[in-house]
Image: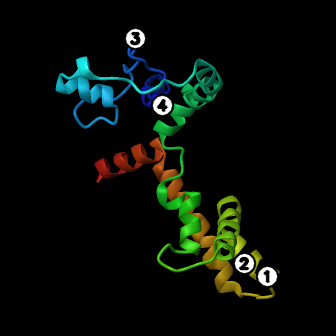
């Protein structure tokens, strides 16, 4: 993962005199044109595009260093991340599906609702409804509570510990 993060910086700072493609994926289907040329045996004809200026590399390198910190990468490998179905974007599109025509106002409302849900869980739907004058009953509150519990369970199961426990439970039976 570390190499994949740094590949773009090195790739974009490469020149004909100093190619830096050691982190780029190898092979004929690589996104790196230099690696593709290397695989195809056409490096002699390969010409680099203009490299990013060193000042730009100096500015973006601290960002890359931060994003490639060992602690962050270990969290990612351990499963402590949101999966696609529970990501912020997924929440936005659940509120305003792409297949439905919508205006900028609809998207803004969908983003506000997604932000509330992402930060505070399904219970925010009830708060939003109350704020616009719609009072829902006990069943709606139970539904939101159940949704939040299921979210927590799914998140826990996605962690490395959860997956190992699940695997161990399967072996017992």
Q: CA distance from mark 1 to mark 4?
A: 45 Å
**Of callouts 3 and 4, the N-terminal one:** 4
- Describe residue 160's horizontal placement relative to residue 169 as left or right: right
Q: Name which residue lies at 57% across and 66% down.
A: 91
Do residues under tags 1 and 2 come within 8 Å of each other at their CB atoms?
A: yes
Q: Quadrant of the N terminus?
A: top left
Image coords of residue 107 (percent x, y)? 64, 71
**Of callouts 3 and 2, the N-terminal one:** 3
Q: Which residue is mark 1?
A: 130
Q: Is residue 29 above or below residue 132?
A: above
Do residues under tags 3 and 2 come within 8 Å of each other at their CB atoms?
A: no
- Describe residue 44's horizontal placement relative to residue 95 as left or right: left
Q: CA distance from mark 3 to mark 4?
A: 23 Å
Q: Name which residue lies at 29% across and 48% down.
A: 171
Name which quarter of the figure residue 71 lies in: top right
- Describe residue 168's horizontal placement relative to residue 107 as left or right: left
Q: Which residue is mark 2?
A: 126
The 10 Å Cα crowd at callout 2, few under 14, some 14 to 19, many 20 or more, is some
Closer to the camera: disc 3 or disc 4?
Answer: 3
Question: Element at badge 1?
Answer: helix
Q: CA distance from mark 4 to mark 2?
A: 41 Å
Do residues under tags 4 and 2 come within 8 Å of each other at their CB atoms?
A: no
The 10 Å Cα crowd at callout 4, few under 14, some 14 to 19, many 20 or more, is some
Q: Which residue is mark 4?
A: 5
């Amino acid at each position: 993962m570390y190499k994949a993060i740094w590949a773009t910086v090195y790739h974009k700072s490469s020149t004909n005199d100093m190619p830096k493609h050691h982190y780029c994926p190898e092979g004929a289907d690589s996104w790196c044109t230099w690696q593709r040329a290397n695989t195809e045996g056409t490096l002699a004809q390969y010409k680099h595009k203009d490299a990013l200026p060193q000042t730009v590399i100096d500015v973006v390198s601290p960002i890359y260093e931060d994003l490639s910190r060992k602690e962050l990468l270990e969290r990612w490998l351990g499963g402590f991340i949101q999966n696609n179905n529970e990501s912020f974007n997924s929440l936005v599109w659940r509120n305003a599906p792409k297949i439905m025509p919508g205006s900028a106002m609809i998207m803004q409302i969908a983003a506000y609702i997604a932000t509330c849900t992402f930060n505070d869980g399904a219970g925010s739907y009830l708060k939003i409804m109350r704020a616009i004058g719609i009072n829902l009953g006990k069943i709606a509150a139970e539904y939101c509570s159940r949704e939040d519990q299921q979210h927590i369970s799914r998140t826990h199961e996605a962690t490395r510990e959860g997956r190992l426990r699940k695997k161990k439970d399967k072996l017992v039976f």
